Amino acid sequence: MARWRRAFLLLNSLSVLLLILLCAFILPFSTCPHGKDICFASYYGDHMVLQKSPERSILWGYGSPEGGLVTVYLSGPMKHKSSPAPVKKGIWRVTLDPIEAGGPYNVTAVLQNSSTTVTDDNVTVVVQNSSTTITDVLFGDIWLCGGQSNMYFKTSQIFNASEELAIASEYPHVRTFMVALETSDTERTDLIRVSLPWSVPEASGLSEFSALCWLFGRYLYKKLNYPIGLVESCWGGSPIEAWSSSRALQQCGLDQNGKKKQFCSHCENSVLWNAMIHPLLNMTIKGSLWYQGEKNTNYHQNKYNCSFPAMIDDWRMAFHLGSGGQTAMDFPFGFVQLSTSIKGSTDNGFPNIRWHQTADKGFVPNSRLQRTFMAVAMDLPDENSPYGTIHPRDKQDVAYRLTLGAQAVAYNEKDVAFLGPFPKQILSSPIYLNLTYDQAIAAKPSKDLFEICCSQPQTPCEFQSLWIPVSIIQWSTTSILISANVCKPTTEVAALRYAWKDWPCDFKSCPVYGANTTLPAPPFIIHRNQANGNSYLSWNDTFL
């Protein structure tokens, strides 16, 4: 798998770069409003956040005439002047030097245009300057928030919304920007529309912004104490295929599906990538958050273990190349493992997608999903949500769990526990299974969240196989003993799974949590004949 990933990155890097350059300089471009000679692209504006050092921020926009030279000036805590960059095919682009976190700055782009007049007696050179300025600009970390309706879920809709909105003004260095809902059949150079321009948080504007994105940014700011920029680009009811480029879809055999055959305009292949992600590639970012997968519980569900990692790989490559190498090639990518939908449902769509979100490993980061972090949310249901049970109002706990992952993975903070307990060893006897976890656990009784599959030796168990609920018999600080005496004499326990339900438990009431972290154990499925091939898990027989 690692060789496949390296090959994918190497084979596609040149083609991605060429496509990005084509889209930036050949596709039809916008012009500046009101007859201006120079302007910034759509997602630059007053109150924005630019990526701080050690990365270098990219500024770009439109200019006229062709060949005019654009220089960018920063004035604020420090002064900076960029090297001049020419206008090519109506577009200029400048890469700033690394700027430390802070501000505010005024950022001015100056277009110098020289015209020459030749007469019999002399040569006259006329230099004309045009400029445009954005103000109150901060340097910090940029996080892109994408996905479907649970990422789109507004701050005004969460538990304790009024209290959250009331304190918004206490966080003036956490800035927000929202991409408008648009689709496109081709990759766009710039955004078609902006829903919310860069803003200093206040109640009326923040009420419409993504709750999860905002809470993550606010919690992260309290840890880092420097500016955070949040870019929301998400659409309810959208499948992953809409957010993926054709390159990523090809990796999973999905590139020919969804072409004008979908049941909604924003569900077709690549239409949201084209309109709502591709225009942002020139932006230098720190990382990305993702909350999506509900739509894929009944659409290409069995492909999600490919389509999700492929999208992450492709985003990383495209942002790296689009920013001229400033966005990290492996920028941190955090996501929410699906919460719940229907209490009592026996449909396997949600648990199957949860598993596929980890590339069928059960945890992240792993060999297929490196530099990723995950917030488990299956224990945060909301039976009384007025927005439907698929939309839980508790986004605070989800954001807190994501923040822990960001601290550990994105910011390399040591001793930050961000993973729930996961089995590292299974000892099997004819009547018991003994699970040893990789950390101290807090457990309680359960009659049905652990399930075993009985099968003939070497016969694999599938999602649709017969799974038999078994009880927790006892537990210690690091292990759980469960009953296993339900298999017929001619069969054996071939697989074990945990929390394989749409709605596994009530609020924060699943049977296994980290004793020191209160983080839930994630769902898993472990096959006896595959376990010993893993570096992180062993399954051995014992007759003690």
Image (cartoon, rainbow, N blue to C red):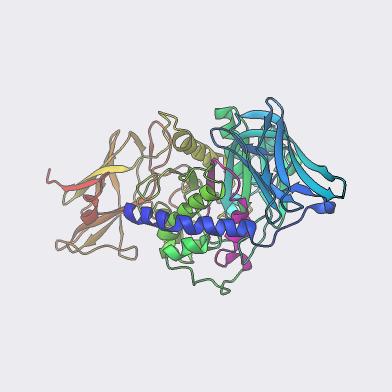
**Residue 537 seen from this side:** yes
> As rendered, which of 457 and 208 lies closer to the eye?
208
* Residue 247 located within the stretch drawn in magenta: no
> As rendered, which of 388 and 402 lies closer to the eye?
402
* Residue 286 located within the stretch drawn in magenta: yes
Residue 242 horizontal side relative to residue 352, left or right? right
Residue 132 horizontal side relative to residue 450, left or right? right
In this view, the residue farthest toward the bottom is: 261
Report the magenta residues as a range: 265-293
User: In what quadrant of the picture does the C terminus appear?
Assistant: top left
Q: Quadrant of residue 125?
A: top right
Report the residue at 63% width, 68% height from top: 265
**Image coords of residue 51 (percent x, y):** 60, 37
In this view, the residue farthest toward the top is: 77
In this view, the residue farthest toward the front is: 120
**Residue 297 seen from this side:** no
Report the residue at 70% width, 39% height from top: 71
> As rendered, which of 287 and 279 lies closer to the eye?
279
Report the residue at 49% width, 48% height from top: 336
